[in-house]
Amino acid sequence: MSLPPTTGGPGAGPEPGPDSSSDGDRPARPVPEATVSRLAVYLRVLGELRESGVETVSSEELAGASGVNSAKLRKDLSYLGSYGVRGVGYDVASLQQRLQGELGMDHRQSVALVGVGNLGLALAGYAGFAGRGFPVSALFDVDDELVGVDINGIRVRHVRDIPEACAAGGVTIGMVATPGPAAQAVCDLLVQGGVQSILNFAPVLLQVPDDVEVRKVDLSVELQVLAFHVARRQGAGGSAVVPAEGREPSETNESVVS
Amino acid sequence: MSLPPTTGGPGAGPEPGPDSSSDGDRPARPVPEATVSRLAVYLRVLGELRESGVETVSSEELAGASGVNSAKLRKDLSYLGSYGVRGVGYDVASLQQRLQGELGMDHRQSVALVGVGNLGLALAGYAGFAGRGFPVSALFDVDDELVGVDINGIRVRHVRDIPEACAAGGVTIGMVATPGPAAQAVCDLLVQGGVQSILNFAPVLLQVPDDVEVRKVDLSVELQVLAFHVARRQGAGGSAVVPAEGREPSETNESVVS
DNA sequence: GCATGTGAAGTTATTCACAGCG
DNA sequence: CGCTGTGAATAACTTCACATGC
């Protein structure tokens, strides 16, 4: 029960070298993690601009539409090299292409979704995925009622088929939308199938090998951060608490997706 | 088209003083933003520990179960004051209570959800919300097919009722799960209804007054960050790109939830 | 002239390492 | 003696401000 946290090694010490992959070439251009998330945002905005027929944008404009300030945007883009023209701005089409390349959109990304319950169904049907280059191409569940059912033209398969199906289908990204208790087992199956990137919606900490990347989306955490700010605004400073008429938080904590 | 970004002022210059609010009292305990998100995670883990009958945890254990290192956890908790016992650890129950207070769980949090489509339905039924103190208490949509329908015992109302219903129901948090183009209008209605915290699932940047807090959950961005790491691993360093057999990203970009 | 690209300064967050207390 | 709480050191990220080049 005391396994090491996400990133770190077994506990020995800090990692030996900055990059252990055998490529050996360039120091693998260090794009800061914070920058990567924003690149994805810029890419969407560029898509919208392109549809609107805009051919060129300044850092100021693109930044404004992305919700960041222009200096940050320029610094972010500078990690990819110079793709702007001084005194003019950026060419929308070519910057878009550059970002797509950088964000791995030139590799085919194949997404598998495990857990076709409440949330899973929504994710399976989420137009934003297919529309942005991440078509969900495989569905899995344990429920016999669901296995065999067609959703958006994709047949739900049993989770036991995950390793084989993922390996065969070249799945690069797995999404885990199962109840918490099932998540780790499912994750292991995905890893077994060669999946190296996992988006986890289950409220648990997934344990994975060092070469697998996990991102977690925790909706309750998002709400709680908002609740914090609500409390901050209303309750002001005090430490004493208002009893919140007639209802205590109580220890209810069933957790987990449906 | 050149509205100022989220936080900053009109753009004149740096703010005059460190704190311009008129409270004047304590510097309003500065809990770092990054810490707040983690407090929510600790709170969940504490709930699980409590259910397991654990009465005391060390920073090491709690940190491990939360996916952070122990120093960070201790520093995070230190912003709330000393609630641990040296040489022993933390009392699970009292720490849980303390965190609940800090995260606004002692105020009643009432959540309104706008957009009962694909994703909205899933969110409405997400057990994790109700179970963790965030019951969705109001549903809204524009679709006449949906208005009037009962979902989990809650009747869907028309979006035009948002201002009145939110004000009357004391809604503190609004969730926007509409298609992108509708999001801003919906957001305005929520703000009109007095909602000061919004969780936005639509792929657009919401424009709100300074006293309203918005958090954005963008699933495509999450996938793209993962895709970036996939590409980084496989494609290695090179700048030149593999044409990805037979399919270009193309300019398809319909975006938006169903 | 004008907007990019970038060193340098500033800010925020993480980690270290150890004093202090039960 | 063990584990918390925290100042100090480090690292990551952001913002500033201006040289650079079209």
Image (cartoon, coloured by chain):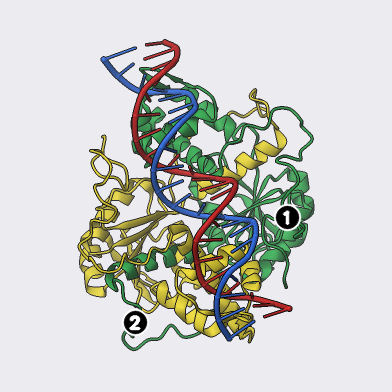
Chain colours: A green, B yellow, C blue, D red
Is residue A199 depicted above or below A92 in this figure?
below
Judged left or right of residue B94, residue C18 is right
Mark seen at residue A240: 2
Q: Where is residue B238 shown, x and y percent of the image? A: 67, 26
In this rendered view, identify the residue nearer to me: B168 or B250. Answer: B168
The amino acid type of the residue labelled 2 equals: Ala
Residue A135 appears anywhere in the view: no
Q: Residue at x 34, y 37 (%)?
A: A64
In this rendered view, identify the residue nearer to me: A150 or A55. Answer: A55
Mark seen at residue A190: 1
Helix, strand or loop at mark 2 = loop
Q: Where is residue A88 shown, x and y percent of the image? A: 36, 18
Judged left or right of residue B209, residue A69 is right
How would you rate the neighbour count of disc 1 (Cα within 10 Å): few for under 14, some for 14-19, many for 20 or more? many
The quarter of the displayed image where residue A117 is located: bottom right
Q: Disc 1: which chain?
A: A
Q: Where is residue A55 shown, x and y percent of the image? A: 38, 22
Is residue B196 depicted above or below A109 in this figure?
below
Disc 1 versus disc 2: distance between alpha carbons? 47 Å
Q: Disc 2: which chain?
A: A
Residue lying farthest bottom? Answer: A246
The quarter of the displayed image where residue D20 is located: top left
Helix, strand or loop at mark 1 = helix
The amino acid type of the residue labelled 1 equals: Leu
